[in-house]
Image (spheres, rainbow, N blue to C red):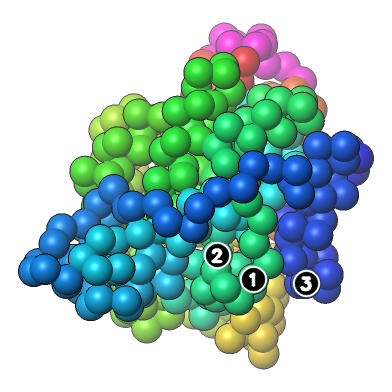
Amino acid sequence: MNKKITRRKFIKDAVTKGTALALASKTLGSLAIADATETSEFHEAMFYRQLDSVMIECTLEPRGCIVNNWERGYCGAKENRDGKYYSLVHSRLSAVYVEQIESDHFYHVRPGNQFFGLGTAGCNLGCKFCETWHLSQVRPEETEIQNLTPEYAIKLAKAKGCKIIDFTYNDPVICYEYVIETAKLAKQNDLLTICHTAGYINEEPLRLLLKYIDAVNVDLKAFSKDYYSKVCSVEFEHVLDTLKFIKQEKVMLEITNLIVTGHNDDREDISSMVSWILENLGDEIPLHFSRFFPNYQYKDLLATPEETLEMAYDIARSSGIKYVYVDNIPGHIYQSTYCPTCKTKLIDRNGTDAKILDMDKEGVCVLCHAKIPGIWS
């Protein structure tokens, strides 16, 4: 089955049919995930410290949960069992799918290719607008779980002809240990590894993660401490630290800003965000302004008006960011990639369809020879 599907369609179908895995088993055909090797639910977490004989502190992300015996952290996906902290989602997937890379807001990574997407239950944010709330805002036992070891995930990806592994749908920080093991195997099998994250992670685990990840898309939810605190239940500054560290490590980075109607669509806040990106990350980071659709706790809001997204686009482009996109509006002119030097259209996009035009396989404009940042071949 090679039918292309948008991220919104995937989410809608997953909810309608009860689970993303119901779709996955059809998509993966003869290598159905039901054939995957059985795995234990016990897998010790990599980043935590013992406070006493039974109490632990999670050191994976800035929230730093203090977890008593037989309790879980905020994410709901790790549990303290007699002083050891265990992941409950290692090799226990809630979403497995083959999609076009453009559906996950990667525009400068192998346009037109498909990725093998992996996700679990749980999240370390509590975003009220979450597009994948049916996965991220529940505990593992509240979703259908299917065992899928790192080895079998790689086997399935290759069987489907996918050369890209994408850790997405919920935040890959939640299944960190699984991501590390799977990404290591992917590199050994010459597969590209990417992930889509909110970037709420401490520096040490982030440094290790980036050794095995080729490209990252970070959701910059807004440029407001108040918004992050009230709408996402986390602290804003840590996400900025993550963005700067990814840039420092020279890993391919794209940024997505989901503009939520009446909440983070203020012109001054968008201008402040753009100014910060220019000052700290440079003018070549692809920036996506994505359309919000009513969801989760914000079901009564209106979808983002097209003119609001275009306003954000104009602010970013006029300020000097070279690669700015309007997402979740199929066929919009600002989905395509243009050469910042000669203005030639280099990649034509319509939804998740992408066609490379006047750019060679190394990402060079064939007309003016400007080099476009990205992973192209």
Q: Residue furthest bottom?
A: 300
Q: Which residues are magenta?
A: 357-370
**Do labels 3 and 2 touch, CB within 8 Å?**
no
Three-letter amino acid code at disc 2?
Ala
Disc 3 to disc 1, how far (Cα)? 8 Å
Q: Is residue 183 magenta?
A: no
270, above or below 175, in the image: below
Q: Is residue 367 magenta?
A: yes
Residue 143 numbered mark, or none: 1
Q: Quadrant of the N terminus?
A: top right
All told, the count of numbered labels is: 3
**Do labels 3 and 1 touch, CB within 8 Å?**
no
Residue 121 numbered mark, or none: 2
Three-letter amino acid code at disc 1?
Thr
Q: Secondary structure at mark 1?
A: loop
- Residue 76 position, x and y percent, is 43, 72
Q: Secondary structure at mark 2?
A: loop
- Residue 264 position, x and y percent, is 47, 73
Question: For residue 144, what is the image quadrant?
Answer: bottom right
Q: Quadrant of the C terminus?
A: top right
Front residue of this view, candidates 56 and 24: 56
Q: Which residue is mark 3?
A: 18
Front residue of this view, candidates 158 and 168: 158
Q: Secondary structure at mark 3?
A: loop
Disc 2 to disc 1, how far (Cα)? 7 Å
Disc 3 to disc 2, how far (Cα)? 14 Å
